[in-house]
Image (cartoon, rainbow, N blue to C red):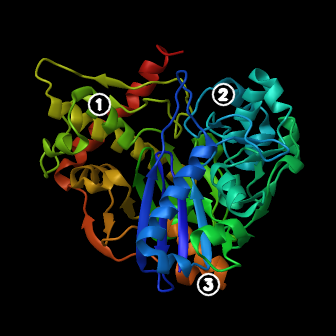
Amino acid sequence: MFLGLDLGTSGVKAMLIDADQTVVASANASLDVSRLHPGWSEQDPSHWISATKEAVGSLKTSHGKALSAVKGIGLSGHMHGATLIGTDDQVLRPCILWNDTRSYAEAAKLDADPRFRALTGNIVFPGFTAPKLAWVKNNEPEIFAKVAKVLLPKDYLRLWLTGEHISEMSDSAGTSWFDTGKRSWSSELLAATDLSEEQMPSLVEGTQAGGTLRSELVSEWGLAQGVVVAGGAGDNAASACGMGTVSEGQAFVSLGTSGVLFAANGSYLPKPESAVHAFCHALPNTWHQMGVILSATDALNWHSHVTGKTPGELSAELGDALQAPTGVTFLPYLSGERTPHNDAKIRGAFIGLGHETSRAALTQAVMEGVTFAIRDSLEALKSAGTSIQRVTAIGGGSRSRYWLASIATALGMPVDIPADGDFGAAFGAARLGLIAATGADPLAVCTAPQTAETVEPVSTLSQGYEEAYGRYRALYPAIKSTMN
């Protein structure tokens, strides 16, 4: 058996698979986010450990025999988080999460240094790790002075699991300290934020061993000695391993809390000015590009909270058939935006409201706004040299056929729905655990699932969608001047 652990913003998922990659069982434990000030987003790392104990404990209760046969563990986690560790491996402050934008001024200052884009292949986004450390240095200097190690969230879990300070390429590429082409830390970029390589974890590939499980946990969970913990991956690269999106030309769209358009690359293709992320993949000698929007299902959840209707109820009001855009436009910039604008201060808007505007029209506009933000990412990936012919849909929002039809029509390409099963980050992490423990061929393990259904573009609405996308594109510069 092989165990995948996925540390998400809202919870930890533990998944057991067997040697044939059949999912045997999974369990979840919830997490909360602390938002002390506007733009802040933090979590207490001790809660990650508690949630992992709860999720694995549930598996032990329900599938103890299967759990006892685990030979490899893979890790996945939300990226960019700054987990600051002292000399005694104690956490110095709550982890500053990926969607925390407080360090926008520090990010802009680092991004103005041409070395960062040249070496990392990316804009220095406020959500990335390096500007967060610059913010801590500027605002909490007593804490900065105590930093012995900076760990990404999943790698703090690894420290608890193995006692080792280790990371891997896909997650580390999202820190703004990484030479993404060379797949190594950049001492030059670290020095620019008054840090050193000694304060970074050592590096392995995601498919390689990244420690072994501590004896205390071996005993607690009823395992045999020598359980390998794989390098693992950042959450999107792990999802790509779960989806089999590991070779040139393969792509997926993720409708989760945030939205992602992810394309695997056989070579390193940076174009930072497009605000496309160019990161290492979890497999050796493989890279990927991502367009990222900060609010996908989060936008519908916000609309749900305001209207008092569940997301499912709101979606049901639209019916199954895709409708032409109404003229109401929604900008989903509820916590700023990454691709293509790199703007932490921009905020969302409804445009085109009238007395006749119904709740259903607002719901339709929210979905279309997220759809058009994903179209923005497609245009950015095209400009960076990536060609995509079709995408596979994952994430909670992909349960809405209406939303998928909207995406297919706006992108002008088929959207595949995988056969029943969970092929997300926890499954991808379990696959990496299998590879690290057995030495299996990564490409033979990370295969794509069967397609259950394909959602085609609605050709009769293509022109209407193109016009609506044009309106959407015109609005960002129009409202930007009111928010700065």
The earlier-in-sequence mark between 2 and 1 is 2
Instruction: Identify the element where label 3 is drawn.
Output: loop
Q: Is residue 305 above or below residue 483?
A: below
Tell me if label 1 and label 3 are in contact, CB under 8 Å. Answer: no
Q: Which mark is residue 103?
A: 2
The earlier-in-sequence mark between 2 and 3 is 2
Q: How many other residues sit within 10 Å of disc 3, few (<14), some (14-19) or many (≥20)? A: few
Instruction: Give percent across and percent down for residue 448.
Output: 44, 75
Q: Nearer the viewer, mark 2 or mark 1?
A: 1
Residue 257 visible in the shown view? yes
Which residue is label 3 attached to?
A: 441
The earlier-in-sequence mark between 1 and 3 is 1
Instruction: Give percent across and percent down for residue 262.
Output: 50, 57
- Which residue corresponds to the image point at 83% horizontal and 46% vertical from the top-left? 88
**Residue type, mark 2 in image:** Ser
- Which residue corresponds to the image point at 52% horizontal and 21% vertical from the top-left? 38
Q: Which mark is residue 305?
A: 1
